[in-house]
Image (cartoon, helix red, strand yellow):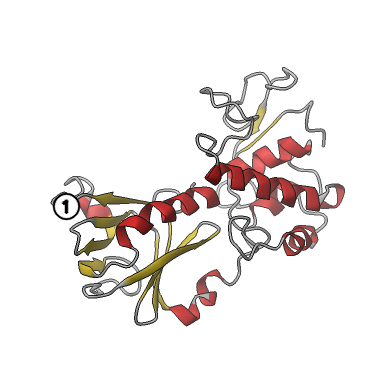
Amino acid sequence: MPEGDSVYRLAARLRPALDGQTIVAGELRAGAAAGTSLADWRVLGHDTHGKHLLTRFDGGWTLHTHLRMQGSWTVTAPGRVVPRSVAPTVRVRMRTAWERTAWGIELPVVDLVRTEDEPAVIGHLGPDPLRSDWDPVIAAERLARDPGRPVIAALLDQRNLAGLGNMWANELCFLLGYGPWRAVRDTDTAALVRTAHRGLRASVSIPGMFQTTTGVTRRGERHWVVGRAGRPCLRCGTTVLVRAEVADDPDHRRTWWCPHCQPC
């Protein structure tokens, strides 16, 4: 699943193609507003909050989309379209006067809301380390409000801190030396918040360091534990363990940890 830094980079990629441009042809093909024509709408800009993408138009409208597991966006050059095999999965199409086209593919969430009503779709989210209104104090307080909860579950809860997906949550636990199921009360929530902020900021601002937590960009060495089940810990050599996700339980996604570096 894309994480907050993925969506942040996506917005940066869409801005040069769409921001300030008038849509000459396009429509929504999913959601409650499916069938709505976007022709003659002008894109004012893009914003993100956690894993949520907001495309704002003149006239006071916002397109709210979420990638979840399968969604993506692509932009094609003038005269080009997405492959025929992909066309049936397009959920949003926006072609500008420059003849560049943005395609929202397999988007599971497509909401058209009044811009003033954006809180209805993102108001539940906690602070986002990549936003200008980032508040580490509130993020730490939210993480700590359920002291008996496993730290891995608290980090994944977007109501506490928006933008952390499974990769970042697992890596943060390693970096702070916490077993994933350690109770929040036994962790330093301020340190978790500081580390999350530093990691995500580096991910989007340092060339080549996208979602790299070890500082090493060699294949297979970007992460301390994620994706390394059965392999030696890069720090101590102990075999990294993994626990399978529990279906339909957001508190129990696939979890990796080093039993030596991360005591419970």
Location of the C terminus (image quadrant) = top right
Rendering coords of residue 6 (x, y %):
48, 48
Q: Residue at x 58, y 48 (%)?
A: 165
Residue sitting nearer the eye, 157 or 201 = 201
Q: Which residue is mark 1?
A: 78
Rendering coords of residue 244 (x, y %):
60, 37
Using residue 122 as the reference point, say whether residue 196 is left or right of it. right
Q: Is residue 253 visible?
A: no
Residue sitting nearer the eye, 27 or 86 = 27
Using residue 66 as the reference point, say whether residue 31 is left or right of it. left
Q: Residue at x 64, y 30 (%)?
A: 214
Q: Residue furthest right?
A: 186
| Element marked by disc 1 | loop
Q: Residue furthest left?
A: 79
Q: Amino acid at mark 1?
A: Pro
**Other residues around mark 1 within 10 Å, as few (<14) / some (14–19) / many (≥20):** few
Rendering coords of residue 131 (x, y %):
58, 60
Q: Is residue 73 visible?
A: yes
Q: Residue at x 80, y 44 (%)?
A: 182
Q: Residue at x 62, y 21 (%)?
A: 230
Q: How many marks?
A: 1
Rendering coords of residue 61 (x, y %):
38, 78
